[in-house]
Amino acid sequence: MTDAQNELKLSTFKFHEQAVRATIGGKPLTLDALELGGEILVVLTWLGNAERTLRKPEYVLPLSAVTHQDLGSDPDAKYKWAISTPLPQSLFDGTASRPFRRQFGVKAGPALTLPLKPTQH
């Protein structure tokens, strides 16, 4: 018997690979995003399990928490969104403190698992 109150329900989500352009530590990079429950979540870090060939988002940044542009209306655009504010490298390399991550609205990633990306040589 399951306790309905303790049951986690996830709505459907959409994965946007390399859809967000951002400047991180002074370098232009592209990031993945998840569309979940009407919110766009930019994936800052992934946790991977090579043995099971799966990965899950470790930390995400709600796109609404930063100044950004929606580029989705341009069919020729390479990206769907562009983050206007430069982001510090510490949000991506695990060195940011919890209070610092909170200043940017960073939160733990949703309980989703996706296939690992094929390694590119």
Image (spheres, rainbow, N blue to C red):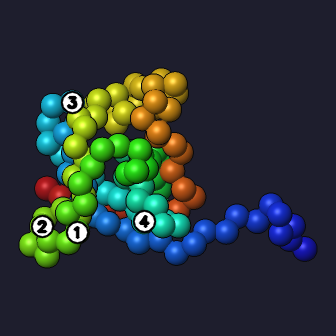
Give, as a three-letter code, the residue at label 2: Ala
Q: If the image is split into quadrants, where does the C terminus sit?
A: bottom left
Q: CA distance from mark 4 to mark 2?
A: 18 Å
Question: Callout 1: 10 Å neighbours few (<14), some, many (20+)?
Answer: some
Q: Judge depth for marks 3 and 4 and give the one in front.
A: 4
- x then y, percent, for residue 42: 37, 52
- x then y, percent, for residue 64: 40, 50
Q: Which residue is mark 4?
A: 35
Q: Is residue 96 above or below residue 83?
A: above
Q: Residue at x 48, y 67 (%)?
A: 38
Q: Judge depth for marks 1 and 4 and give the one in front.
A: 1
Q: CA distance from mark 3 to mark 4?
A: 25 Å
Q: CA distance from mark 2 to mark 1?
A: 7 Å
Closer to the chain start, of discs 3 and 1, is 3
The image's mark for residue 77 is: 2
Closer to the chain start, of discs 3 and 4, is 3
Q: Is residue 68 above or below residue 27?
A: below
Q: Residue at x 90, y 74 (%)?
A: 1
The mark tally for this picture is 4
Closer to the chain start, of discs 4 and 2, is 4
Disc 3 is placed on an element classified as loop
Q: Which residue is mark 1?
A: 72
Q: CA distance from mark 3 to mark 2?
A: 24 Å
Left or right, 41 with reference to 69? right
Disc 2 is placed on an element classified as loop
The image's mark for residue 25 is: 3
Q: CA distance from mark 1 to mark 4?
A: 13 Å
Query: CB atoms at circles 2 and 1 under 8 Å apart?
Result: yes
In front here: 101 or 95?
Answer: 101
Disc 1 is placed on an element classified as loop
